[in-house]
Image: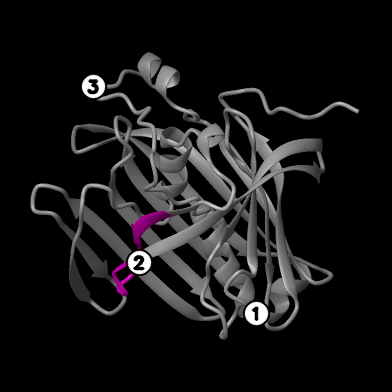
Amino acid sequence: MKKISIFLVLIMSFSLNSQSHPTKEWDTDPVSDSEEEKVSAFKPGEWLKFRIHYGFLNASYATLHVTSKNLNGIPVYHVVGNGKTTGFASIFFKVDDTYESYFDKRDGRPYKFIRKINEGGYTKDVEVNFDYDSETAVLKDKKNDKKFNFTIQEDIQDLVSAFYYIRNTYKFEDLVVGQSIKLDVLYDDDGVFNFKLKYLGKEVLKTKYGKVESLKFRPYVQSGRVFKEQESLTLWVSNDENKIPLRIQADLRVGAIKADLDGYNGLKHQFKIIMD
């Protein structure tokens, strides 16, 4: 069941990663509560829940929750992602993961990222602080009492903020089928990694809420250890102003795993469902 914990990372990141002609929609002025509603594809109070299946098992759930905070005098969004195995699956492999990100309401830059995981007894407690004046990110490994310094650029994202950055910077209608898009992400002591993603086009997806028009993507992942091939992972995103993930599916070396949107609350825009 180790594959479930790896898949939780994919749920948290939902890395629709960009650097190809993004359209800036963040506000550049100080943000009030009323202003943030005008410039964002999401709002404080948004909550998303995903149900993850591994084979016949309802293996786990993952959630993402957005709130509004003030970090060192800076208005930020605070997103908390949680993932846990449940029921029968938790007997064999217990997962209890938490991911947090604090990122600027004006431009989406992350200031702090927290990763606390317990996966079958394997634990990590990591905090990353981003300093854009010195172009440095300091990663604190609290479990092993270590620090790592990484050189960063202005367009860096963490594992969680990347999802929300995409929702506010990309005009999805400008995407071209076959185009690959990228984003630099830092979340662990391995340093900054570049995630490559290919847009596959539109597709009407059947969900628990009805049929939803979606945008389909295929990220390139490392084959061999977990995933069957480099193109084993597929993502579907709602083709509306919310731009929320609807389904994530992967072919693994052993079996397959799928996550579906199972609950939502506090969406800023109407969730568009196709009526038969």
Q: Quadrant of the C terminus?
A: top right
- The residue range painted magenta reads 182-193
Instruction: Assess whether residue 187 is covered by the magenta stretch.
Output: yes
Q: Residue furthest top?
A: 34
Of the residues under marks 1 and 3, which one precedes in the sequence?
3
Amino acid type at image mark 3: Pro
Q: How far across and how far down the image is residue 244, in percent?
A: 60, 40
Callout 2: helix, strand or loop? strand
Q: How far across and how far down the image is residue 42, in percent?
A: 50, 30
Tell whether label 3 touches label 1 (CB within 8 Å). Answer: no
Return the residue at label 1. Answer: 228
Q: Residues within 10 Å of mark 3 (few under 14, many from 20)?
A: few
Amino acid type at image mark 2: Phe
User: Marks 2 and 3, Cα distance to the nearest angstrom?
Assistant: 31 Å
Q: Residue at x 52, y 31 (%)?
A: 45
Q: Quadrant of the N terminus?
A: bottom right
Of the residues under marks 2 and 3, which one precedes in the sequence?
3
Amino acid type at image mark 1: Lys
Does residue 27 lie above or below 107 as drawn?
A: above
Does residue 138 lie above or below 38 as drawn?
A: below
Q: How far across and how far down the image is residue 215, in percent?
A: 64, 43
Q: Residues within 10 Å of mark 2 (few under 14, many from 20)?
A: few
Left of 146 or right of it: where is 203? right
Return the residue at label 2. Answer: 193
Q: Nearer the viewer, mark 2 or mark 3?
A: 2
Callout 1: helix, strand or loop? loop
Does residue 181 lie above or below 186 as drawn?
A: above
Return the residue at label 3. Answer: 30
